[in-house]
Amino acid sequence: MRPEGNSRPDLPAVDAGRPGTDGGAAESRLVGRAARNNALWCDAVCTAHGAAGEFHDTVWLNRRGTPRLYPDLVTLQDAAVDQIDTVAALLDSPRPGGWAVKDSFGRLDLDALGFAALFDAEWIHLAGDCGAAPPDGGRFRWRAAKDAAGVAGWENAWAGRPEAASIFAGRLSPDAGIRFLLAVEGDRPIGGGILYRGAGVVGLSNVFAEDGRLDGIWAGLVAEARAAFPGPPLVGYEHGDQLGAARRAGFASIGGLRVWYRS
């Protein structure tokens, strides 16, 4: 199991190391905004599945179980002691399946509660007035899903396996704050991603691309985000090749996170 992430769901998790989170108060505030945006997105997906979560002072959590690839708890502030107690209490909630915790500030030690570290990643940020130009010279076009059929087409391209249980199609509809974006060459999908506006930023997630197209897809998504949501900073989290592509598109790392899992 791998909670909601920014690469294709059939790829293995990659441990990118344990980035530091001592970059100062400004970076901490940015991480807090990115984490809240991510929690708002998780809650939107859970609500679409009929299981809305709960927002508390330092965490977002869901007691009823989340869709596959999505966490049960996201930390919103750097308050490790209180959050460990909250995780321990959450384990008493009667529900099937395992538990996943997104430790947004990389501060929690959940070994004693039976969790194992699933993967590490880095929060990324791009200011609202900068970004890379698409290196492909516009050789492909972008489509934004406009209805349920468009979301289904996007999910099939992202997942690469139409028979898999749907996370988005038939549940989430594009609206003023959500964009399901698909890059096509001719009629063939070659990559895409999701934009979600919330907490004063725009989250970029679920990025995927054909081999050799990753840099072009990242740069194109930045351009599409600027057109759809001019002004707000872009945020997200990545590791491995996706993190490298994000940096080449202009993003900077602002702090580390760790995802924990207990089966």
Image: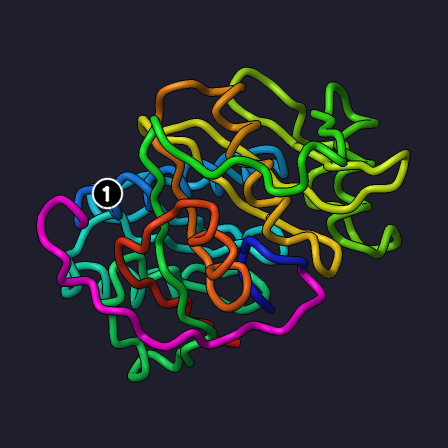
In reply to whether residue 16 is colored magenta, the answer given is yes
* Image: 138 above or below 205: above
Which residue occupies the foreground of this view, 253 or 63? Answer: 253
| Quarter where residue 255 is shown | bottom left
Counting from the top left corner in percent of width and height, residue 213 is at: 69, 52
Residue depicted at x 74% and y 27% = 143
Q: Main secondary structure of the magenta part?
A: loop
Find disc 1 in the rendering and name its residue. Answer: 30
Counting from the top left corner in percent of width and height, residue 235 is at: 39, 41
Give the residue type at disc 1: Leu
Residue depicted at x 38% and y 47% = 251
Q: Magenta segment, which residues?
A: 9-27
Counting from the top left corner in percent of width and height, residue 25 is at: 9, 48
* Image: 86 above or below 16: above
Residue depicted at x 29% and y 70% = 19
Specify the farthest residue to the left: 25
The quarter of the picture where the N terminus appears is bottom right
- What is the secondary structure assignment of the residue under circle 1? helix
